[in-house]
Amino acid sequence: MSADGGGVWWPAPAKLNLFLHVVGRQPDGYHSLQTAFQLLDWCDQLQIEPTPGEEIVRIAGPTGIAPEDDLCVRAARLLQQASGCRQGARIALRKRIPTGGGLGGGSSDAATVLCVLDRLWRLNLGVDRLAALGLQLGADVPLFVRGESAWGEGRGERLTPLALPERWFVVIHPKVSVSTAEVFQAPELTRNSPLITIRAFSPGPGLDAGTRNDCEAVVRARVPQVAEALDWLAGFAPSRLTGTGACVFAAFDNVAAAERVAGRVPDCWTSRVAKGVQRSPLHSQLATMF
């Protein structure tokens, strides 16, 4: 790898919420959650090049997101401000993960920028400080900064590494978007799920029948396309919403079974077979290149 990072594409993996319980509200108004985060081998890609000036420029990215609103750009500027760094960066983003699907793509992109620029700018802030910065950008960013599948509590930022079985997931995007803010503001959302322990969580080959996604009932009632996708996928294996949606998923213990189901997904939706991974592909690449 060249010292300036030129030509290297860095992965930003997707995640699934294997379950999502809303257990209360915090004094600041945010919801208190319990969840299990499963990282996937399905990734956006970013090219990040440090520059001698202080300007942060996105040279390529999704047309539907203005550079000023892109979490990649915001992450680079936040890191620059927090560290006092006088360097800039040029960032190119290839989106592979659907936006607004509950897969954490934007948060993962931001985490990749934080982790890679920390190395390229030679800041060496460390994972704890980068995770704290990431939380200012979104509740899921610390997960991707730390780079392990994990048990999450609080807003999702209190993380405990979680060993999960090898599984493949069929992920369906029903080609609609769901507003996270609207789901969490919904009066019908259950906000008093009882706390469970990691020990009580049973991540076997399928989905733990003792858990659920508390947001799923709200999204089902409000977005019929999501309800239809959940019901279709449930004909093959237990299905579930990830995050606040709109993507839904089911777990399989081998890739062939997952691919058979994915091959039957109706053309009105898009689908992907993704493997669950314990360690983020980003951190694996960082370890080999620095």
Image (cartoon, helix red, strand yellow):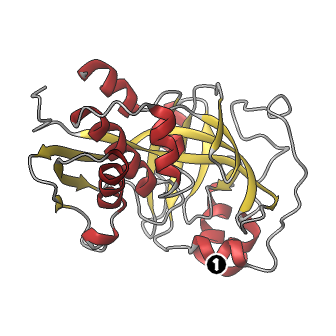
The image shows residue 192, relative to residue 181, as above or below, that is above
Say what amino acid the circle numbered 1 marks.
Glu
Q: Nearer the viewer, residue 184 or 166?
A: 184
Q: How many marks?
A: 1
Does residue 162 appear to the left or right of 167 in the view shown?
right
Does residue 263 appear to the left or right of 11 in the view shown?
right
The image shows residue 253, relative to residue 272, as above or below, that is above
SS at circle 1:
helix
x, y percent for residue 212: 78, 52
x, y percent for residue 13: 41, 42
Which quadrant holds residue 99? bottom left
- Give the residue at mark 1: 182
Q: Residue at x 62, y 46 (%)?
A: 157
Does residue 217 appear to the left or right of 42 in the view shown?
right
Neighbour class for label 1 at 10 Å: few (<14), some, many (≥20)?
Answer: few
Which quadrant holds residue 224? bottom right
Furthest-front residue in this view: 84
Q: Nearer the viewer, residue 158 or 202?
A: 158
Q: Residue at x 81, y 47 (%)?
A: 211
The answer to whether residue 259 is visible is: no
Q: Residue at x 47, y 48 (%)?
A: 133
Q: Residue at x 83, y 28 (%)?
A: 199
